[in-house]
Image (cartoon, grey):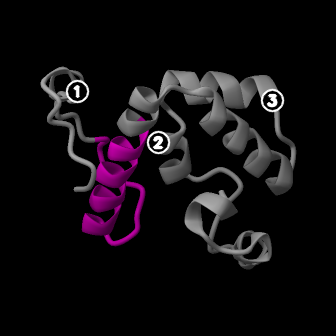
Amino acid sequence: MAEALEVPKMTIHRRVKDGVMGQHSNPLKAWLSEEAIQSLQYQQAPTNIDELVSAVGRAFEELSPQTLDNVFVTLQACMIEIMKVKGGIGYKVPHFGKGGLMRDDNLPTQL
């Protein structure tokens, strides 16, 4: 996670300790809800932040570029929805036909 966010691991540790980030937050859960990442992450069964970062890194390496594109577009869409509710968890995961957009080679790289 630290690598993906381009921040030091200690920043993640501090955010968890300060309560800014939870060990189980809905935005993180939404991001990991893609079946492939979720399956790989649960197979790893991380018990602390370092193991979680490692499991996500391994999942990133093992998944196809198409799946990762799908995941990151979903993440961006969720983050937009989270901002609309001012950081709360009362948002719905947006659906916008990523499969069709991918088939047409029209999946956006950023939202």
24 vs 6, nearest the viewer? 6
34 on left or right of 90: right
x and y percentages locating residue 89 in the rendered image: 42, 56
Marks 2,3: beta carbons within 8 A:
no
Amino acid found under the numbered disc labelled 1: Met
Residue 44: image tag: 3
Pointer 1 residue: 102
Determine which residue is flagged by label 2.
Answer: 30
Residue 19 included in the magenta stretch of the image: no
Report the front residue among 47 and 55: 55
Identify the element where label 1 is drawn.
Answer: helix
Circle 2/circle 1 CB separation < 8 Å:
no
Report the magenta residues as a range.
Answer: 71-93
Give the residue displayed 68% in from the left and 42% down from the top: 56
Mark 3 and mark 1: Cα distance apart in space: 29 Å
Q: Is residue 55 above or below residue 25?
A: above
Indicate the quadrant where residue 66 lies: top left
